[in-house]
Image (cartoon, grey):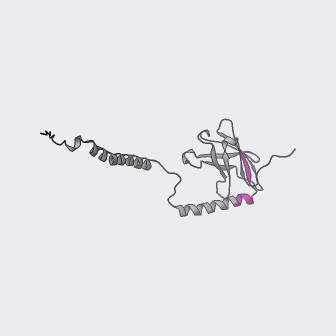
């Protein structure tokens, strides 16, 4: 004679398989909500809403580069030891204004961008001071322009290569003795 014992069936919530099957989608939903919240809170400074208008603005800026080349404008920007003071030595066929705008644009993070007002300190010499030292990054696009935005000179500066950057065309060369 064979005795079989019948156990009453366990309720579903005491079985491991329903929890595993419910847990995987539940964890996926929680992770998805986390990534959605992170995407909403973070600002993507590289994307523009009006790309057509931005493209037209780029063409206008290229005209400003050509205007600076026609003026024979070039410069050399030097960073002081304090990481804030700037000195700009210019070369131009025409007289430049008493003040110039300098923008240092970080290629990926617009939070690191810096602006400075460069004032004339002598013939072909401008000085300015940044609000905070350049310690956050080592790669910048440098733009120097007049306040009327008629021209601009640009350059790419990797601070690890030294505290000096050449801007515009033709490049400044050291004077021969």
Name which quarter of the figure residue 139 lies in: top right
Q: Check the image and name the residue furthest to the right.
A: 177
**For this view, does 29 lie left or right of residue 69?**
left
Given residues 11 and 32, the one toward you in this image is 11
Residue located 53% across and 53% down the image: 46
Q: Check the image and name the residue furthest to the left.
A: 1
**Is residue 78 part of the magenta span, yes or no?**
yes
**Is residue 108 part of the magenta span, yes or no?**
no
Let me know if residue 135 appears in the view. Answer: yes
Name which quarter of the figure residue 148 lies in: bottom right
Quadrant (top left, top right, bottom left, bottom right) of the N terminus: top left
Given residues 56 and 121, the one toward you in this image is 56
Residue located 57% across and 49% down the image: 108
| Chain part drawn in magenta | 66-81
Residue located 67% across and 41% down the image: 160
**For this view, does 25 lie left or right of residue 146?**
left
Let me know if residue 102 appears in the view. Answer: no
Residue 41: % across, % down:
43, 47
Given residues 1 and 77, the one toward you in this image is 1
**For this view, does 109 lie left or right of residue 129?**
left
Residue located 57% across and 44% down the image: 112
Residue 78: % across, % down:
71, 42
Residue 126: % across, % down:
71, 45
Residue 94: % across, % down:
76, 56
């Amino acid at each position: 004679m064979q005795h079989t014992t019948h156990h009453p069936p366990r309720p579903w919530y005491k079985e491991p398989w329903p929890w595993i099957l419910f847990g995987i989608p539940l964890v996926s939903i929680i992770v998805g909500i986390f990534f959605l919240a992170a995407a909403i809170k973070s600002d993507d400074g590289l994307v523009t809403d009006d790309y057509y208008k931005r493209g037209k603005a780029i063409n206008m800026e290229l005209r400003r580069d050509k205007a600076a080349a026609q003026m024979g404008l070039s410069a050399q920007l030097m960073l002081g030891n304090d990481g804030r003071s700037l000195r700009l030595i210019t070369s131009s066929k025409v007289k430049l204004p008493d003040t110039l705008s300098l923008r240092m644009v970080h290629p990926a993070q617009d939070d690191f961008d810096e602006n400075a007002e460069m004032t004339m300190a002598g013939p072909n010499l401008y000085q300015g001071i940044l609000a905070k030292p350049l310690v956050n990054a080592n790669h910048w696009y440098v733009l120097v322009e007049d306040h009327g935005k008629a021209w601009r000179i640009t350059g790419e500066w990797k601070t690890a290569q030294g505290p000096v950057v050449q801007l515009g065309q033709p490049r400044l060369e050291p004077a021969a003795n």
